[in-house]
């Protein structure tokens, strides 16, 4: 159950500083994002809920977008990678998980943050789905495929590894779909991703 607003310290109480205050601000922002989305996020609401003032927030985050992204990073979680024994099976499971995430309330917050960031790469790079870390699971499953002899080492390139998730992201960000049908995920894999993996090997061998 979510905690209520933290009241301002009274007589005899120690004013929060440093990490404790930052944690309270981020927790309040997470609650605001969860309840109202990014569109309803304001510095005033966060300050009231965190029991602090706007100046304390602005000293740490220059605007509500930076604050919203910092809070979203608190919500993002990591999960174990699938290990189905095949590249297609692993990639399809990763796409399905990503599709569920982008279709969820948390995914809605993510899309709102991305829309607010526009082309500001300094903000987009802070999102887990946009940072270099986002390539890690795809490089891992492709590396497993190389180790099994299912793919050539030449295919182990970040742009090749992540093309499937980039295409799925475009379904949400560019086309604005609320969720991607499973046949779209299969099409991304069978018509683009897997042929590209195979093409890298043939291209080097030519």
Image (spheres, rainbow, N blue to C red):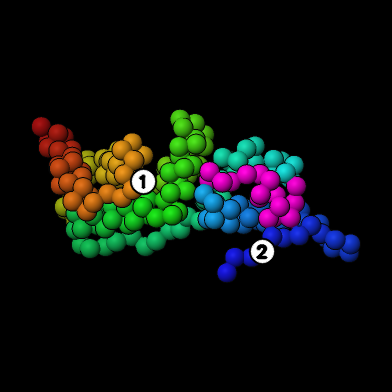
- In this view, the mark in front (2 or 1): 2
Q: Main secondary structure of the magenta part?
A: helix
Counting the numbered discs, the total is: 2
Q: CA distance from mark 2 to mark 1?
A: 37 Å
For marks 2 and 1, the one nearer the N-term is 2
Toward the left, the furthest residue is 206
**Neighbourhood count class around disc 1 (C-alpha, 10 Å): few under 14, some 14–19, many 20 upward:** some
Residue 131 shows up from this direction? no
Q: Which mark is residue 198?
A: none
Q: Quadrant of residue 1?
A: bottom right
List x then y, in percent, for residue 39.
53, 43
- According to the picture, the residue beneath numbered tag 2 turns out to be 4
Image position of 56 (left or right of 14): left
- Looking at the rendered structure, the secondary structure element under dot 1 is helix
Specify the label residue 135 is tagged with. Answer: 1
Give the residue at x 28% y 56%.
96
What are the residue bounds of the magenta stretch? 38-53
Position of 125 compared to 103: left or right? right
Residue extending farthest to the right is: 11
């Amino acid at each position: 159950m979510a905690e209520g607003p933290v009241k301002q310290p009274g007589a005899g109480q120690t004013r929060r500083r440093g990490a404790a205050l930052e944690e309270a601000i981020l927790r309040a922002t997470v609650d605001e994002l969860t309840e109202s989305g990014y569109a309803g996020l304001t510095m005033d609401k966060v300050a009231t809920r965190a029991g602090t003032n706007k100046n304390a927030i602005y000293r740490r985050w220059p605007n509500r977008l930076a604050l919203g992204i910092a809070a979203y990073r608190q919500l993002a979680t990591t999960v174990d990678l699938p290990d189905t024994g095949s590249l297609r099976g692993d990639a399809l499971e990763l796409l399905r998980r990503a599709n569920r995430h982008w279709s969820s309330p948390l995914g809605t917050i993510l899309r709102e943050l991305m829309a607010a960031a526009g082309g500001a790469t300094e903000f987009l790079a802070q999102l887990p789905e946009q940072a270099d870390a986002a390539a890690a699971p795809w490089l891992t499953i492709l590396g497993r495929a190389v180790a099994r002899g299912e793919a050539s080492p030449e295919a182990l390139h970040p742009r090749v590894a992540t093309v499937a998730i980039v295409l799925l992201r475009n379904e949400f960000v560019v086309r604005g779909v609320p969720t991607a049908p499973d046949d779209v995920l299969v099409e991304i894999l069978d018509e683009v991703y897997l042929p590209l993996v195979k093409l890298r090997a043939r291209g080097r061998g030519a």
